[in-house]
Image (cartoon, rainbow, N blue to C red):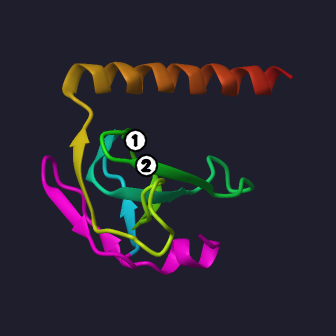
Amino acid sequence: MSALALQTSPSLSLSQGVGVTLQPGQARTLRVPSAGQLRVTQGALWVTRRGTRPSHAPDDLYVAADAPLALRAGETVVIEPIHLTQAPATQVALVAFHWQPAAGRCAGALRWLRERLQAKATRTHAHA
């Protein structure tokens, strides 16, 4: 997906436990409110995530049913249905998925660890 498509596809809100269905040809931008998992329950998604740094190119991922995709808080991704690996490219089916935010203590521990690692990296770069 092009950088322009990352900026122009319609947005979709993520709500805990709510299932979402996309028809073939529907691309949607997700702005992730909190860390969690997107789990495809039917079909397959093509996911384009922005690089972790502005200079990095977007990353493209194929996510099939029952494969969780961990997303970070504040991350922006574009999702769209794609054909299943065993199906011809012309046979794109609808896709269904649900969103599950990271749970309490685990999410807090991960946030704490991320902050500590970022602080250490910042100190290391300052001394270099």
User: For residue 97, what is the image quadrant?
Assistant: bottom left
| Element marked by disc 2 | strand
Name the residue located 36 percent from the left edge and 53 percent from the top edge.
32
| Disc number placed over residue 93 in the picture, else none | none
- Which residue is disc 2 drawn over? 63
Q: Looking at this view, is 115 or 37 the one in front?
A: 37
Within the image, what quadrant is residue 30 found in?
bottom left
Q: Is residue 105 magenta?
A: no
Q: Position of residue 65 (x, y in %)?
A: 32, 46
| 23 and 83: which is toward the camera | 83
Secondary structure of the residue carrying numbered label 1: strand
| Image location of residue 3, percent across then percent down | 63, 72
| Image-based side of 67 in relation to 52, left or right | left
Q: Residue at x 63, y 73 (%)?
A: 2
Left-right relation of 34 to 72 = left
Magenta span contains residue 18: yes
Q: Are marks 1 and 2 in contact (CB under 8 Å)?
A: yes
Residue 96 in the image, given as x and y percentages of width and height: 24, 59
- Image check: 21 left or right of 9? left
Q: Amino acid at mark 1?
A: Leu
Residue 40 rendering spot, x and y as whole percentages: 30, 49
User: Is label 1 or label 2 in front?
Assistant: 2
In the figure, 51 relative to 126: above or below?
A: below
Residue that carries the numbered disc 1 in the rendered image: 69
Q: What is the three-letter code of the residue carrying label 2?
A: Val
* Mark 1 / mark 2, whichever is N-terminal: 2
Magenta stretch? Answer: 1-26
Q: Quadrant of the N terminus?
A: bottom right
Quick one: label 2, few (<14), some, or many (20+) residues within 10 Å? many
Q: Is residue 54 left or right of residue 107?
A: right
Q: Residue at x 34, y 18 (%)?
A: 109
